[in-house]
Amino acid sequence: MARRLSRTALFGAAVVVVYAALSIAAPWLAPHAPDEVFAGGAFEPPSGAFWFGTDSLGRDVLSRVLFGGRTVLLMAGSATAISVAIGGALGMLLGLRRGLADQVVMRLIDIVMSVPPIIFALLLIGALGPSALLIIVVVGLLFTPNVTRVMRAATLAVVGEDFVLAARARGESGAAIVLRELLPNVAGTLLIEFSIRTGFATIFISGLGFLGFGAPPPTPDWGVMINEGRSTMDASIWPVVAPAVCMALLVTSLNLFTDGVARVVDRAAR
Amino acid sequence: MTKPGIGVISRRLLLAGTAVLASAPRPFAATATKTLRLATGETDGVKGTLDPAFGNNDNDAARASLVFERLVIPDASFSPQPQLAVSWKPDETGQVWTFALRTGVAFQDGTPFTANDVVYTYRRLLDPKLGSPAAAALSQVDPDGIRAVDDHTVEFKLRSPAVEFPLLIANRFTYIVKAGQTSEQLRAAGIGTGPFRVEHFVPGEEPSVYVRNEHYWQPGRPHVDRVELRGIAEESSRVAALLANQVDIVLELPLRSLQRLEGNKDVTIQSARTSDWYGLAAFSDVPPFDDVRVRQALKLVVNREQYLRAVVGGHGAVADDTPVPPWQKYGLQDAPRPPDIAAAKKLLAEAGHPDGIDLELYTSAADSGLLEIAALFQAQAAPAGIRVTINKAPAADYWSNVWLKKPFLVTNWNARAADEALALPFLSTGEWNETHWRNKEFDALIFEARKTLDDAKRGELYAKAQRLLQQDGGAIILIYADTVGASRANVHGYRIHPQKINHDFSDVSIDT
Amino acid sequence: MSRPLARLIGTRLLLSLLSLFAVSVIVFAVMEALPGDTAQRILGRDATAQALTVMRAQLHLERPAIERYGDWLTGVLHGDFGTSLVARRPVLPYITAHFSYSLLLAGIALALHIPFSVGLGLLGAATRRDGPIDSTISAAALLGMSVPEFVIGIFLVSILATTLGWFPPLALIDQAHSVPAVVSTLFLPVLTLNFAMTAYVLRQTRNAMFDVLRSDYVRMATLRGLPRRHVLLRHALPNALAPAINAIALNAGWLVGGVVVVEVVFNYPGLGRLLVESISFHDVPMIQGSALVLSATYIAINLAADVATMLLTPKLRVR
């Protein structure tokens, strides 16, 4: 598939990979600890020692951004993984085994999806108190219904195909059908879902952080950093600009990649 | 007077809508009404109240200052000054106080202010069925001992002698309300003697609007016709609103944003040295803090200058573990002790922690500066082997579920005169004893000082009490923060008071 | 309207009501099961033991949860949304007032963005695919979708309001007494909302247009010699409208959530902000009322979107 991806899509994928690499290597790459106070003066402009300057407590913005990237990728990635794993499995199952269970579950999903997601998140996190784990679980669960729907639709599209009917006629077991006939054909959709949900999750989680419902310190979180920094933007814009640009770049790259994969899958289905 | 919320809002919306359609400006705004637009640093949403018995934030204090007045007010050096009372004197025991009330004062509805209103106000505050926090602050007053001697004289009988009683009743609860008003009325439509009366206040709706009190007793005041009060919690938004002329006075300015305003010709900045203090509170009855050496060690690791820089950008002063600053009456004049990591380590070892200790420190975004203090303390304590984990609690929860409940947290207190500043947080019987410190000697010193008529001797007693607090107490009082406010350059007559809740808007005027 | 369609709409309506009921139960259950003492939140720092006891008694919190929920539900069915625990006043006027403000903001944002984004989508499709104009529009759309709206909002305020002073930094709608003032006050929040929404609809419209342009149906029209503009407007656009409308509806739904963040950034007295505040006070009746109204709006919008899509897509109607 990589061969058939457009250049922009490959570029997007490359950026995401670089992000992941930087995040994993953050503890070794970052010049300072993210919560090391008064490494420099407060609100220093960018310099050789502090590439993005310092924040209100003299912490190195670059280090905080690097570690923040770790947090973001970890939280957004985990939440998406949960939603894709559960939603994917459920969607494929429902698509294969139609019938009463399918109807009931889809109705339930309609009901759950009638609550605006941000409200649900605010309620749960507001009442239980923010923690990284809770945020991951809540966001993961919030995205699951949507993924289920998409995967179910994709499964339905494949199930009607001749080769699946043939496999059934041959007497192949359900599991074998899933593995050999179904998965390869919905893999593209799955990948698209994973990629696009990660972007949405990043934005959603940083939005929660911005509203004050983000992961507690010392976890540096881009949304929280932006919220903390915006009161003092006249002293220095870097504590806000640096995480904002990084987030924009990450999500844009994810979207470029998603677009590319979508085009390929589209063409293949034609 | 006060209309139901939906009526006014829908009316405003309809007007905005019609304005959009008909392109006509609203008529009444075009007249030359002088409106003073105030902004505080907090939003209280639907929690807001005008009732002085339940006010507990900056917005409530501002509202009360506009509509009500007190018998006695504290001046900038915390000496009692007359407002609705013109003079006062104790009897020989210091247990019975008589106040002579000002004559010729009328409430906003025209009825005269008499001693009855004072009795009603205070009895209400002390009424256990009302459940006002004021009852604890006024615990020395005997509710049956308040009586109106005549129309303009009130007598207070106290449970024990209190030399500084007049200062004690100059707090945020004791605004005089017209007798007979119920809690419901006082919540949003109270009647007082202050310079402005309520035109529109619905909790949760902003701004609240007040208009000039035609019956106000100070001649020639107020100088504006109308006041609009709103809260803007976001620091940069508040500053931006001032610069964009969306508000006239900002009652609380974020100290870190001062750079943007200094040198701006359209804005006047005012600051007052205040004894608002920030620090850490530890339960003195819980290990490891129950060992005085551990408490002393904690006080030795802190570099107070750094907090001064980080929390208030240098606008304040370093504190030395006492809530009474050197410039206030009864403040100590000793130089603050510098940090000493080696001594701290030694003390910890003596207390049985040769490898240092692990502590959990609670903080939140409930007030500006609390998070920074926690982060700084964590960094400063590390070299002494004190390993701190920070627990960031949700802001809304902090004062209800963390403060007074968790053994080690970041705290702050508003400025108060010496007795209250020492008594409220540190007396063993205090409702707000955030360090669980029960020191009989300290208590005795305070109670004795309250009865001591000789000022010099009283000073000695308070000094002794403070030194005891520094040595033995569970609070690490780090810094005092200046109070800073700002107004547009064309606004005059507003003076910032070291105790944030004391406002006087009667003298404010606006040049056009 | 055809019988199957009517039946479909009927079923969906019933389902929507069921959803609303479920929402109210979920919200109530969540707030009940989780910690948070309203009396503490109201009294704050000054709370004394005595004060708390009195306040709790006044709030009637000791009655069992089922009873309280039952009372609330009966009230709602009669149009009474109960009394706010914190404000001690009826909940409904607060919700109506705040909801009106949110509608104003969202309505203007939506109204402006539909012609804008559909137009841009058409423009992009009208020119060569991946050509310079199309690429620029595409790239801008991508960026708009990738940056969270609060970031956009913060930077717009920073540049246009604080630095340049062209617009007020806070949406203090009560200070706006004339048309220009209202426009100026709402300009930045509306622009912020539009960035994200436009991007999304733009991409959907453009993609849909390209899809349709490639279809046999349109190729036939072009081969027949019809002018390109005619082909675009008369043949392509109507068929691309369905995904576009779907996207717009999704946006409208997104607005219900997205407006919360914008209201917080701009200090705007909308329903989203009321909800956030009520949560921090643990003011259960207010939370329930706000959540219910927001959910109902969300459901209604989704329903309208589905119906519109069904009406516009003849293939789906006939089943």
Image: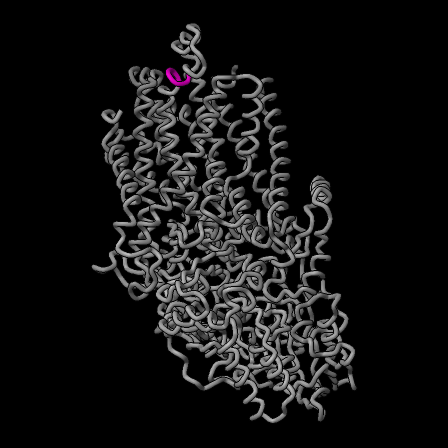
Task: Tell me where residue B356 appears, x and y as whole percent.
Answer: 40, 63
Bounds of the magenta segment: A178-182
Q: Quadrant of the C terminus of chain A?
A: top left
| Residue at image point 44% right, 51% down | A210
Front residue of A264 and B307: B307
Is C15 left or right of A178, judged from the image as shown? right
Q: Is residue A125 above or below residue B432?
A: above
| Residue at image point 32% right, 31% down | A259
Task: Tell me where residue B8 appears, x and y as whole percent.
Answer: 62, 56
**Quick check: is C180 in the magenta stretch?**
no
Front residue of C106 and B453: B453
Q: Is residue A150 above or below residue A80?
A: above
Residue C242 seen in render = no
Q: Quadrant of the N terminus of chain A?
A: top left
Task: Tell me where residue B319 appears, x and y as whole percent.
Answer: 44, 77
Q: Main secondary structure of the magenta part?
A: helix
Number of marks in picture: 0
**Quick check: is A179 in the magenta stretch?**
yes
Task: Tell me where residue C70 appears, x and y as whole percent.
Answer: 72, 41
